[in-house]
Image (tube, rainbow, N blue to C red):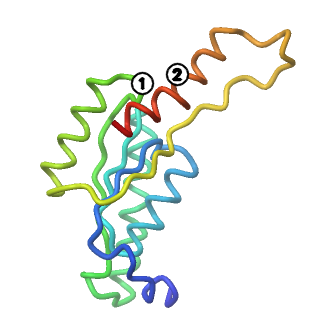
Amino acid sequence: MSSTLNDRRFLGKKIIITGAGGNFGRDGCIFFACRGACVAAMDNNADALNETIASVESVCEEMRQGSVPEECIGKIKGYTCDVTNVGSVEDAVKSVGEDFGGIDMLWNNAGYQGQIKPTLEYDPNDFATVMNINVTGMFIVLQ
């Protein structure tokens, strides 16, 4: 924990993390919140997003109990967002700006692995979903 407290690069920074309901996204939310960042967690799965928020809040509470100064503990807010939908992304980003007063960083983490099958057995619709989330979704969020 002491190395976390010494890492002040993200203190007070406002970061959007897409795909926050998945394993990497959840760990990223914890990483940045433990270093004092304000985390805007985005995912299209509200239940997974709520699990992430609960995990981050639990870790932050442990830090408080361990006498970590409040200014070194970040915060998190969740936003349900479909990265493949321009309107959904625009609404979420607008809300983040209003809630946090700006955005300093983006971890464009949302992704979908798709089926694990030989090429000839792979469903083209699933491949289209992979491309829509992993490529088009990344582009939409960057805009």
Q: Nearer the viewer, residue 35 or 45?
A: 35
Vertical arrangement, residue 30 with respect to residue 128, above or below: below
Tell me which amino acid carries mark 2.
Asn
Q: Nearer the viewer, residue 69 or 62?
A: 69
Q: Cβ–Cβ below 8 Å for labels 1 and 2?
A: yes
Q: Residues within 10 Å of mark 2 (few under 14, many from 20)?
A: some
Q: Quadrant of residue 75?
A: bottom left
Q: Quadrant of the C terminus?
A: top left
- Location of residue 91 in the rendering, given as x and y in whole percent from the top left corner: 21, 32
Vertical arrangement, residue 139 with respect to residue 51, above or below: above
- Location of residue 140 in the rendering, given as x and y in whole percent from the top left corner: 38, 31
| Numbered label attached to residue 132 | 2
| Numbered label attached to residue 84 | 1
Which badge, 1 or 2, is on the more N-terminal residue? 1
Vertical arrangement, residue 125 with respect to residue 71, above or below: above
Q: Residue at x 45, y 64 (%)?
A: 30
Q: Residue at x 18, y 57 (%)?
A: 100
User: Is residue 103 toward the left or the right of residue 28 in the image?
Assistant: left
Q: Nearer the viewer, residue 50 or 83?
A: 83
Q: Residue at x 41, y 50 (%)?
A: 17
Q: Residue at x 35, y 22 (%)?
A: 85
User: Is residue 27 toward the left or the right of residue 90 in the image?
Assistant: right
Where disc 2 sits, the SS reads helix
Tell me which amino acid carries mark 1.
Thr
- Location of residue 4 in the rendering, given as x and y in whole percent from the top left corner: 48, 82
Label 1 and label 2: CA atoms lie apart by 6 Å
| Numbered label attached to residue 40 | none
Where disc 1 sits, the SS reads loop
Q: Quadrant of residue 36?
A: bottom left
- Location of residue 66 in the rendering, given as x and y in whole percent from the top left corner: 39, 87
Q: Quadrant of residue 93?
A: top left
Vertical arrangement, residue 89 with respect to residue 17, above or below: above
